Amino acid sequence: MRCAFRNIGAGARGPVQCESALWLVWALCVLLLGCPHASFAQGHEAGAPRVVLVRAQRLLDVRSGKIVEDAAVVIEGDRVKALGVATEILKQTPAAVAVLDLGSVTLLPGLIDAHTHLLARIPEGDGGYALNLVTKSEAYRALEGAANARATLHAGFTTVRDVGNEGSRYADVALRDAIDRGLIEGPRMRVATRAIASIGHYHPFGFSANVDGVASGAQMVSGVDDARRAVREQIGRGADLIKVYADWSAPTLTVAELQVVVEEAHKAGRKVAAHASTPEGIRNAVAAGVDSIEHGTHADQEVLRSMKAKGVFLVPTLAVMDAWAAQSPDNAASPQLRAHLEGSRRTVEAARAIGVKIAMGSDPSASDRHGRNAEELVAMTKRGLSALEAIQAATTSAADLLGMAGHVGTLEAGKYADLIAVEGNPLHDIAALLRVKFVMKGGLVIKNDSPPVRSAQ
């Protein structure tokens, strides 16, 4: 590196000028930054992580289901440092520590939604999806995503797996990165970007054959080479996972196509989520080696046993259909919807009995669904899960599915300081999680509807 500037520009004159320039750069660095060792020492001292103690009447251990009475959590920077009974924790905590006393609430870890679409605010009606694609720019879609992300975080969901951005190309990558950099409020995101579907088997439908170049809600492929290329492209553009549509009203992608998706994704350390509702579509996806089945409405006993054996997760997405049924008597009476609801009930009950791993996913895609993620927990209990099992689906189980169990999903020393608080005991009333009073993400208070008071130590 004797002459890094030698050939830059027409005015470069050789080694002497180059060495002078290097010395100038070094001198400027010294003037701007000062002594490197002194700067490091001062910065470390000035930037020491803040320590906060959060106190509450109860804390739920989501692994065991046990309640810790008069609980405290000590947070250092963005991580949990210690937790337990407040009287014991306070003995080990300096008197000067900042205390947030939340009073008569129950603390839980931040919730995880394993099936979101934060870039989706699709208008109602048969043509709503196409209208969404052709009337909104990617920039506008990203801004909608920011609003949806904030609503999701304020609902107590501090981490999400976003399984397809519904035609906004890579705007979900930008949203994820903006959240990570603190530009906007939102949950930690794991994003699937465009998703992958078979040509002709995903939105939008119904366009004239004369219309070319219409935007699509997924990356359309045909054949193994197309499928492999799509995975590589999406990972190259920032995908944390890959989403495939293994069926629509019938199976679509072949087992061979699904296999190359799984091969390329796993080779790059990414998991594969498969939209699949038909028995054959689910069988194809499981045979190909996917990591989760999304929806799984009409899974049979045989494929559920295969999912159990292979460790494939089920993400059933129930509340969105419950909400649609509740919109009108006509919806509730629809034979198609009733068959769907009955299928999902049987699937969840059978999956629970067989021991299939279940993760919570709310599947929001309309403006009024974002921020109502916890309705999925209520819906899960209506299909036979206990309140604790539903909470575990949104904490420990979802963290395992996302590959983030070392960072989120429980309140434990060393994990992210993601905390929420609700009135009452959610083991007795799961609907309490619809009314989150307090949200902390990574040690930062996002929401506090009950202003804290300083506790006497």
Image (tube, helix red, strand yellow):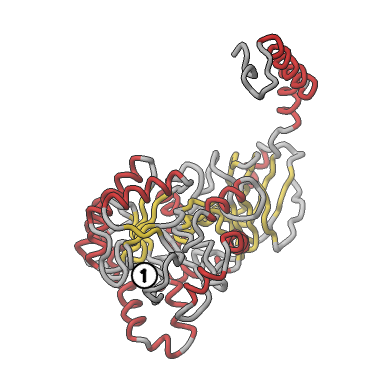
The amino acid on which the numbered mark 1 sits, given as a three-letter code, is Gly
| Residue in view at x 64 percent, y 23 percent | 8
**Which of 154/87 is in front?**
154
**Which of 64/136 is in front?**
136
Q: In the displayed structure, does residue 336 sit left or right of residue 409?
A: left
Q: Is residue 10 above or below residue 121?
A: above
Q: Position of residue 91 (x, y in %)?
A: 67, 38
How crowded is the residue under tag 1: few (<14 C-alpha within 10 Å), some, or many (20+)? some
Q: Quadrant of residue 435?
A: bottom right
**Residue 442 showing in the rendered view:** yes
Helix, strand or loop at label 1? It is loop
Q: Is residue 32 above or below residue 415?
A: above
Q: In the displayed structure, does residue 296 sit left or right of residue 12?
A: left
Q: Quadrant of residue 4?
A: top right
Name the residue that disc number 1 marks. Answer: 384
| Residue in view at x 30 percent, y 65 percent | 247
**Residue 392 showing in the rendered view:** no
Quadrant where the image shows the N terminus? top right
User: As drawn, which residue projects farthest toward the right?
Assistant: 31
Q: Is residue 259 above or below residue 216?
A: above
User: As drawn, which residue projects farthest toward the top?
Assistant: 16
| Residue in view at x 48 percent, y 57 percent | 162
**Which of 372/143 is in front?**
143
Q: Position of residue 331 (x, y in %)?
A: 42, 86
**Which of 135/34 is in front?**
135
User: As drawn, which residue projects farthest toward the front?
Assistant: 10
| Mark count | 1
Q: Position of residue 352 (x, y in %)?
A: 31, 63
